[in-house]
């Protein structure tokens, strides 16, 4: 399943952080994100953890810790500029999938 997402690669996410829009999906290789700067691939074995948090009480965001850094991603319904309507349930579903990958990779 493909998700419309807003994402940011970096150590910190605030209300002033500029995010990019893209399309994300999971497959046997890992997490793929197509964005304006090209395709980003995070291999399954690089995912260390994935956890949900609420950014200033406004919406759910997934913090993905990888071997190469930190990624913030959220599933959106609609995004106009930097203003986004977050899809609460699909963000939770994507986090469960990413957490499952991280747990399996930790066991191996």
Image (cartoon, grey):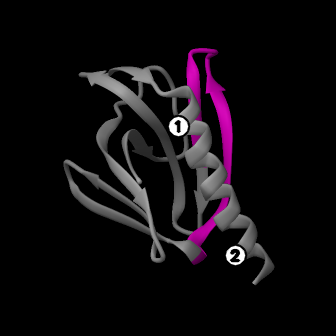
Out of 11 and 34, give the one closest to the viewer: 34
Up the image or down, 43 lies above or below 96; here it is below
Residue 98 disc label: none
Instruction: Mark 1 or mark 2: name the one nearer the start of the chain.
Output: 1
Q: Residues within 10 Å of mark 2 (few under 14, many from 20)?
A: some
Image coordinates for residue 32, horizontal then vertical, percent: 38, 62
Q: Quadrant of residue 45?
A: bottom right
Q: In which quadrant will I find the N terminus? A: bottom left
Q: Going 37% across and 26% down the picture, which residue do you hit?
A: 77
The range drawn in magenta is 45-63
Up the image or down, 104 lies above or below 20; here it is below
In the image, residue 61 lies in the stretch drawn in magenta: yes
Up the image or down, 16 lies above or below 29; here it is above
Up the image or down, 72 lies above or below 54; here it is below
Q: Going 76% across and 74% down the picture, which residue do you hit?
A: 106
Label 1 SS? helix
Image coordinates for residue 39, horizontal then vertical, percent: 27, 62
Image coordinates for residue 56, horizontal then vertical, percent: 61, 17
Instruction: Look at mark 2 in the image and give the residue it sits on.
Output: 105
Image coordinates for residue 75, horizontal then vertical, percent: 45, 36
Instruction: Look at mark 1 in the image and give the residue it sits on.
Output: 90
In the image, residue 54 lies in the stretch drawn in magenta: yes
**Residue situated furthest right in the rendering:** 107
Q: Going 21% across and 53% down the picture, which residue do you hit?
A: 37
Determine contact: label 1, label 2, CB under 8 Å: no
Taking the image as shown, residue 41 lies to the left or right of residue 36, namely right
Q: Residues within 10 Å of mark 1 (few under 14, many from 20)?
A: some
Overall secondary structure of the magenta section: strand
Taking the image as shown, residue 51 lies to the left or right of residue 68, namely right
**Number of callouts:** 2
Q: In which quadrant will I find the C terminus? A: bottom right
Label 2 SS? helix
């Amino acid at each position: 399943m493909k998700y419309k997402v807003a994402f940011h690669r970096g150590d910190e996410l605030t209300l002033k952080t500029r995010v990019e829009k893209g399309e994300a999906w999971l497959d046997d290789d890992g997490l793929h994100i197509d964005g304006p700067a090209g395709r980003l691939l995070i291999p399954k074995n690089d995912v260390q953890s994935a956890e949900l948090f609420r950014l200033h009480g406004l919406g759910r965001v997934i913090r993905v810790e990888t071997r190469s850094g930190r990624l913030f991603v959220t599933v959106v319904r609609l995004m106009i500029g930097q203003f986004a309507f977050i899809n609460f349930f699909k963000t939770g579903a994507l986090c469960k999938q990413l957490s499952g990958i991280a747990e399996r990779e930790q066991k191996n």
